[in-house]
Amino acid sequence: MELKNNISVYIEVAGSALSTLSIELLGKARQLADKKGEQVVAYIVGADTSKAAEEAISYGADAVVAVEDPVLEGYDSALYTKAIAALVEKYAPSVILIGGSPNGRDLGGRLSAKLKVGLVADCIDVLHEGDDDTLTWIRPAFTGKLLVKIQTTTRPQLGTVSDKIFHGVPANPSRKGDVIKEKVDFSGDAPTVKVTNFEAVENAAESLSIESAEIVVGAGRGVQNEEGMKAVEAFAQRIGAAFGVSKPLVDNEWAPHDLQIGITGKKIAPKIYIAMGISGAIQHKLGVQDAELIIAVNKDPDAPIFEFAHYGIVGDLFEVMPELEKQIAKIKG
Amino acid sequence: MNIVVLVKQVPAVSEIEIAQDNNLVRVGAPSMLNPVDKHAIEAAIAVKDAVGGTVTLITMGTAQAAEVMRDGIAVGADKGVLVSDERMAGSDTLATGLILAKAIEKIGDVDLVFTGKRSTDGDTGQIPPAVAQYLNISLVSYADSISVEGSTITATRANHGGIETVQAQLPAVVSVTDKSNTPRSPKIRGKMAAKKAVFDVWRIEDLGLDAASVGKSGSATKVTEMFAPEPNPVGIMVEGNTPADLAANLVKDLTAKNLL
Ligand SMILES: Cc1cc2nc3c(=O)[nH]c(=O)nc-3n(C[C@H](O)[C@H](O)[C@H](O)COP(=O)(O)OP(=O)(O)OC[C@H]3O[C@@H](n4cnc5c(N)ncnc54)[C@H](O)[C@@H]3O)c2cc1C
Ligand SMILES: Cc1cc2nc3c(=O)[nH]c(=O)nc-3n(C[C@H](O)[C@H](O)[C@H](O)COP(=O)(O)OP(=O)(O)OC[C@H]3O[C@@H](n4cnc5c(N)ncnc54)[C@H](O)[C@@H]3O)c2cc1C
């Protein structure tokens, strides 16, 4: 297989498995490559890359090029950069997608300086606008008030991509692909940076705050009673969202004022706000209008919330909620 | 210990206006020290307090950008260097990283380079790794805490869904977050020193660089367009006869539009 000029993905390994972000990048690379009739090549660096290589192929790579060396046991950006630079020299990729994780960003910045090529940081989209291999990268500017399109004038085109933007394809263990191991000379090299301790942080789903969470579920008087409210709260927790309420639920003392969303409660600006059984009074609207996406479930087709929600579902929230949860679980895999 | 802190002048964010044609209106917008760079300065002064040494601030920018270094002098930095040259205008991270690395090399025998994790304007976070690569030294990025002992720096950083402790051999570039410390306030004497401070100005010749490797010609990225994000349209009613259909259609549409 011709491995030059392809779409390459730098694969980050967490533990021994691919990071979720790497899977997302493989999904995007697959899309870009299919449109151009090109191959997706995964670059993997580490002390033991076999399992990750297999996984990368199952998630969409056509081939894996791996650099394995005991000196790569831990992540030292200098040595990882050296490894990838050697692969670039041999395989001359058109593009390398790099995950915008802390380590990925470090690798990207170093690689750009080492190869003297341009890098676009923390992109939220990337596309071919013309017929050649030039990619247009899109990234936010000025705290998201604007977006910029950036191209690099050198090859390979480097870009780091933030997480949770692209979707991976489901793993297909029967996919086939070559795994090529490349030797890089690390004699005389020793890591100068070492991870000496790691402490996992407990998944803090319970303490998600409505002010900072990406997804917020709001419960309104449509929940009927305290028990109904608890059901919505449990739904929020299961889908990884923070939970808030409209004012009447606080007035009824079902929920503390801390959770009230609206003009006399908290103003929120999540990526997604899901309003369950909320009519959409102006005082509530003013608290949620900065959400990027509002989804409303209400059994009354004339409820005012449908005028400012981006998506409306007319139905009984207790019937829609479990179905929504199933669908979300499906795409989360 | 020979310590350098990279500090950047940025526009005061709330002052940025976006014109109809999506061009930035920056004229007259007040500027300030990139907020997280205060923590880089504090990190440097804390190391100097503990083991002794010199703290040199470096900023690249217009003549006016030098003003942000006064914040550093006020809390104990020894001197500042302004790297400024109209030929450097339009430098991307590739060129900026090179220029700053050359300035650090010119100072010579630097043990530690502190930077902020990101700027609030360019916001790439690429300068610390680029500088580390040009200098060919260790990099510890996004440090939430720092301690230096002998020729080793120990830091904690958030990574892989947890907190890792990292040890690096000096010399090193260390980028810090706003959690890394609490910046001290200037005292009267520091404020006086800051007012009086005079900064060296280095141009590209002083750095041994040629004009082709800096500014637009030394950059490898180009902005082709700036535009405002389109808001999502409102009022889409999801179709379907059963709750299951409704939920499926909603999620399908959201996934297709990359909204989930
Ligand atoms: C000074 C002032 C300040 C205020 N501040 C706030 C504030 O900060 N925040 C706030 O939220 N409100 C505030 N309010 C109150 C606001 O005016 C509304 O009364 C309140 O938002 C209504 O809450 P709701 O939508 O939950 O209830 P309702 O308006 O009663 O709406 C309930 C909705 O649920 C739907 N429904 C019922 N059963 C179901 C079901 N089984 N499935 C699906 N849908 C169902 C109904 O069709 C209805 O649309 C304030 C009011 C005043 C005067
Ligand atoms: C909207 C926008 C998008 C951009 N996107 C890209 C891109 O994708 N790729 C690209 O290559 N360039 C990009 N640039 C250009 C880039 O911002 C500049 O090269 C800038 O000089 C340095 O990058 P930064 O501000 O992102 O620094 P960061 O890497 O975010 O800054 C981190 C730290 O480095 C230090 N530092 C940074 N700049 C200086 C300086 N001038 N003097 C002293 N210390 C400094 C500070 O300690 C700072 O806290 C972009 C610029 C803008 C305005």
Image (cartoon, helix red, strand yellow):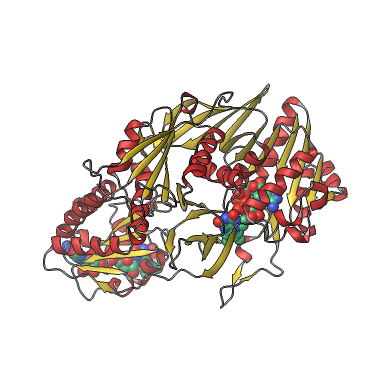
Q: Is residue B119 visible?
A: no
Residue situated in front as seen by the camera: B210 or A205? B210
For residue A55, what is the image quadrant?
Answer: top left
| Residue B176 location (% of width, % of height) | 60, 40
Residue A303 image offset from top left, x and y in percent? 25, 73
Query: Tag count in the figure?
Result: 0
Q: Quadrant of the N terminus of chain B?
A: top right
Looking at this view, is A167 or B55 the one in front?
A: A167
Q: Where is residue A304 in the image (x, y as percent from the top left)?
A: 29, 74
- Figure quadrant of the C terminus of chain B: bottom left
Residue closest to the eye, A50 or A109? A50
Say if residue A245 shows up in the picture: yes
The residue positioned farthest toward the left in the image shown:
B242
Q: Which residue is drawn at 58% across and 33% down?
A: B145
As drawn, A277 above or below A74: below
Residue shown at 79% from the left, 44% from the top: B73
State the residue lying farthest toward the bottom: B20
In the image, residue B33 above or below residue B23: above
Q: Which of B202 and B160 is in front in this view?
A: B202
Give the farthest residue toward the front: A2
Q: Where is residue B94 in the image (x, y as percent from the top left)?
A: 63, 51
**Residue at point 43% right, 67% down?**
A131
Location of residue B249 (image quadrant):
bottom left
Q: Is residue B3 left or right of residue A173?
A: right
